Amino acid sequence: MLECRNLEKKYLGKIAVRDISLSIGEGRVCALLGPNGSGKTTWMKMVSGLIAPNAGTITFFGQPIGKETKKHIAYMSTEPFFYSYMTAKDVGKYYKDFFEDFDMEKYVNLVERLGLRMQDKAKTLSSGLAAKLKLAATLARRASLYLLDEPLNGIDIIAREQIIEAVMEVADKNATIVMSSHLVDELEKFIDDAVFVKEGSIVLSGEAEMLRNQHGKTIVELYKEIYA
């Protein structure tokens, strides 16, 4: 489904992503793991088409990343991307205008399920509720690939469970999901694949169960070993 070959991205001479080659299959749930600054966000922005690599190639179902692939890839950034005057209802209209695959009924259900109200204003939301609103808008698209950048960051334990349940409902519909995080213990319960990124490079990747069997360690233990 997604093929990255020898990807490289530099910012002012500093390498953010270094020679990354990675394949992700259809219908998989993949954890992109690593501490802040390891290159996870840069990789997601290249796959979503927001920034271009300095070297290497990315294809989505055999097609180079571009205008057509953006129709099928839903990216949720770590940064807030709603205007402060917007209500949750406005956010839905905003997304509906931008994305043909946006499902308003699904969005309303997600908003309610995640403990939000359609009249809630973006500027009055706590960081946790704002993260839920971003997630609802992203998951309401009928995309083939969802890129979720740190969706559990700043979220309390109960809210994390709500978010994971919402994500897994999408995963049940054969969509591919890539979630970046350093909260490995939360992701290990349900991921199919794990990719460990360090200083812009992949240092370990594969099916989660295969990695556990090969190394005799949990994904959490591998994370501690790689980044300690």
Image (tube, rainbow, N blue to C red):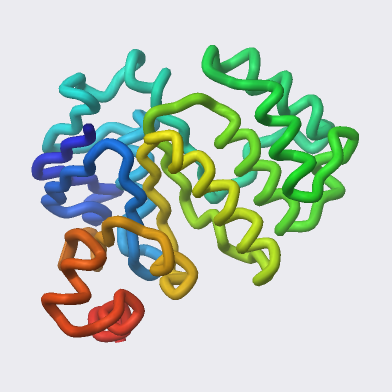
Which residue is rendered at x = 16% and y = 76% of the image?
A: 213
| Coordinates of residue 143 in the picture (x, y in percent) | 45, 27
| Coordinates of residue 216 in the picture (x, y in percent) | 18, 84
Judged left or right of residue 33, residue 130 is: right
In which quadrant will I find the C terminus? bottom left
Marker count (numbered): 0
Q: Residue furthest front?
A: 172
* Residue 182 placement: quadrant: bottom left
**120 vs 212, nearest the viewer:** 212
- Above or below: residue 87 compared with residue 226: above
* Residue 9 placement: quadrant: top left
Which residue is rendered at x = 23% and y = 59% of the image?
A: 200
Judged left or right of residue 226, residue 83 is: right
**86 vs 139, nearest the viewer:** 139
Which residue is rendered at x = 35% and y = 29% of the image?
A: 49
- Above or below: residue 120 compared with residue 224: above
| Coordinates of residue 95 in the picture (x, y in percent) | 64, 22
* Residue 210 placement: quadrant: bottom left
**11 vs 107, nearest the viewer:** 107
| Coordinates of residue 156 in the picture (x, y in percent) | 68, 69
In which quadrant will I find the N terminus? top left
Q: Residue furthest right?
A: 119
**83 vs 215, nearest the viewer:** 215
Which residue is rendered at x = 65% and y = 71% of the image?
A: 157
